[in-house]
Image (cartoon, grey):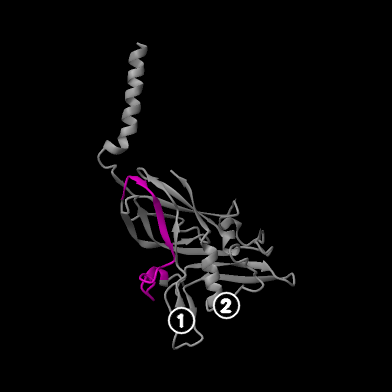
């Protein structure tokens, strides 16, 4: 009798382990990317906004009042070099608690991927001025005098300045532009690829993408809000610094 029970249990384990590969309809699946936010390990949501409670690397005390950013072209990479590119974009709006989850509009084959990546912002092919009705309606456009196209991120709040009073900051990331000569704008790419690393895709997989907001103020450029707090969109050097600091802002969280 014990042998019979053991055989039944073993059979159940084998069937359970094979179900993902063998049951029709489970070979491809949509994948959900869930965007999570923290400040050096302390969770951040819109319920934490509008209170000065964070300290950046420069010891500036600050609040967050707005945070939204654009990701595009999620890509699944196989070890053999094959890729699956998910065309499209997602405007993550932490302020309004919108689009914190992005479900791939196409199904992804179940299996192991050596890397999952996405573009922070738009690359030059996608960054087409006025092309996206939904982004136009959310005041996401970049003025024509700065080359047009779209924002990559808007991070805003208040900080305690060097005379101990509250002051606003607008940390807005766009494609870097030198507009000293309005007839001859000079650009530098500031979109970048975020590589999350290996992900195993199962049926209805859920992938957490973490953003440590503190990193935008940290490294390699220690951000002094007294020096860089507003009018940063036309500031070529500030945009390049944002690009540099953003490289370590994202990481892979839990995969379910």
Residue 193 or 161: which is nearer the viewer?
193
Q: Quadrant of residue 49?
A: bottom right
Range shown magenta: 108-135
Left or right relative to 35: residue 200: left
Residue 253 visible: yes
Residue 211 or 98: which is nearer the viewer?
211
Among the two numbered marks 2 and 1 on one chain, the one whose residue lies closer to the N terminus: 1
Pointer 2: what residue? 231
For mark 2, does the 10 Å Cα neighbourhood hold few (<14), some (14 to 19), or many (20 or more) residues?
few
Indicate which label's residue lies in the foreground, 2 or 1: 1
Residue 121 position (above or below residue 78): below
- The x and y percentages for residue 103 are 38, 53
| Residue 123 colored in magenta in the image | yes
| Residue 117 colored in magenta in the image | yes
Residues at marks 2 and 1 touching, judged by CB atoms closer than 8 Å: no
- The x and y percentages for residue 50 are 62, 62
Residue 205 visible: no
Pointer 1: what residue? 186
Question: In what element is the residue under mark 2?
Answer: loop
């Amino acid at each position: 009798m014990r042998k019979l029970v053991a055989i039944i249990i073993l059979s159940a384990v084998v069937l359970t382990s094979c179900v993902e590969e063998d049951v029709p309809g489970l070979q491809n699946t949509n994948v959900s990317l869930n965007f999570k936010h923290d400040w050096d390990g302390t969770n951040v949501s819109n319920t934490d906004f509008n209170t000065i409670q964070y300290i950046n690397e420069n010891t500036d005390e600050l609040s967050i009042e707005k945070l939204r950013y654009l990701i595009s072209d999620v890509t699944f990479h196989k070890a053999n070099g094959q890729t699956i590119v998910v065309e499209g974009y997602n405007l993550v709006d932490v302020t309004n608690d919108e689009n914190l989850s992005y479900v791939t509009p196409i199904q992804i084959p179940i299996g192991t991927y050596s890397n999952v990546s996405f573009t922070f912002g738009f690359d030059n092919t996608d960054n087409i001025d006025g092309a996206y009705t939904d982004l136009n309606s959310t005041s996401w456009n970049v003025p024509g005098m700065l080359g047009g196209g779209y924002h990559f991120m808007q991070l805003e709040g208040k900080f305690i300045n060097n005379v101990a009073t509250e002051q606003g900051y607008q940390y807005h990331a766009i494609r870097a532009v030198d507009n000293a000569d309005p007839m001859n704008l000079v650009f530098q790419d500031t979109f970048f690829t975020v590589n999350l690393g290996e992900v195993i895709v199962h049926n209805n997989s859920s992938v957490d993408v973490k953003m440590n907001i503190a990193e935008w103020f940290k490294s390699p450029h220690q951000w002094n809000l007294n020096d860089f707090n507003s009018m940063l969109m036309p500031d070529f050097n500030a945009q390049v610094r944002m690009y540099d600091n953003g490289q370590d802002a994202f990481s892979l969280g839990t995969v379910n």
